[in-house]
Amino acid sequence: MKKLLLSGLALLVCIALFSCKSTPRAAAPEDVPVTDTSVSNTSDITIRRPGSEEPSEPETAETDVSGAETSGAEAEPQVAEAEAEADSESPEEFIDYFELGNQCFRAGQFVEAVSNYTKALEVEGEFAAAYYNRGMANRNAGNRDQALADYTDAIRLKADHAKAYNNRGRVYDDKGDFDRALADYNKALSINANFPEAFYNRALTYRHKGDLDKALADYTQSIRLKADAEVYNNRGVAYRDKGDLDKAIADYTNAIRLDGSYAEAYFNRSLAYAGKGDAAKAQADVDAALKINPGYKDAQDQKTRIQQTRR
């Protein structure tokens, strides 16, 4: 009877795995690397089965402009890579559901990922990585309060979980609770002082609070630890907000150097060149942004304005 039950469970898991793997992903998310020091204090044993991958927060760029003449484009904050670790002594059923949750996360099936992490936790309820991964899935599914609860449980089980503090801070920022977000980023950095994502996210929160000098300092720290196109772009936005168009242009140029398909960086550099009165360069950059993303509405509007000034 026991063998029959285990066989039935294995069949159900295989069917569910096929469901997650066979659904096309909208766009393959790019992993956000985390410095080795951010996880060096864990003794968990990583178990990876053939074809399994660690879930990672997808990076997407979004424009926060209400009027493209006055605001720049910012990219979605980076969130630290999810842990996919299971202790070698964990029950087989827990590992199956846990890794199935990872597969669903990678496939963009966040509701299904939440369900499978929950099933894993029903088997073994005191596992920080499962709460952490479920927190990421909940945030991506739009369940902010559940994500906060999951990250809090991960921290309860692992007090030095810098990535959980970082990601919980991101959710607080989503909810507009900037002081709590800053407290979590500060805690993450007290655990791991070489955590570029935490510096980057803290910079975004400082910018949301209107403290551009602190935002610039954190963007710079993040870049020092890891050169990243999005961080350069967003530091450029902060420099532009301070009226330093030359430094803004330099940062947008670095962003484009690191990612030649970064339409928002071309758009932002176009705004900066227009602010300096260089219509030709502004035109070239907005054309480049539209070549990458023909449906980029802010860039279309910018192109119309430039053409009107050049008549």
Image: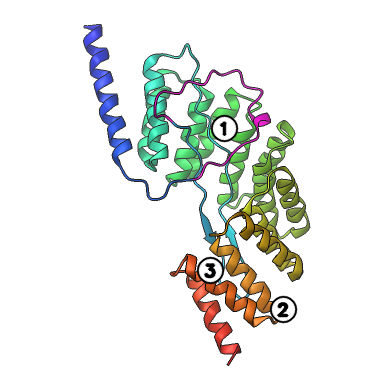
Q: Would you say 43 lies left or right of 296 here?
A: right
Which amino acid, by three-letter code, is at mark 3? Answer: Ala
The span from disc 3 to disc 2 (Cα, nearest Å) is 19 Å
Which amino acid, by three-letter code, is at mark 1? Answer: Thr
Residue 179 seen in the current view? no
**Residue 276 tag number:** 2
Helix, strand, or loop for circle 2?
Answer: loop
Q: Quadrant of the N terminus?
A: top left
Question: Residue 38: x, y in percent?
Answer: 66, 31
Provide the residue designation for mark 3: 289
The disc, 1 or 2, on the residue closer to the chain's N-terminal end is 1
Residue drawn at (30%, 42%) of the image: 23
Question: Residue 218: x, y in percent?
Answer: 74, 49
Name the one closer to the observer, 8 or 293: 293
Tag in front: 1 or 3? 3
Whether pointer 1 and pointer 2 mark residues with C-beta atoms closer than 8 Å, the reply is: no
Q: Is residue 76 above or below residue 159?
A: below
Question: Residue 229: x, y in percent?
Answer: 62, 54
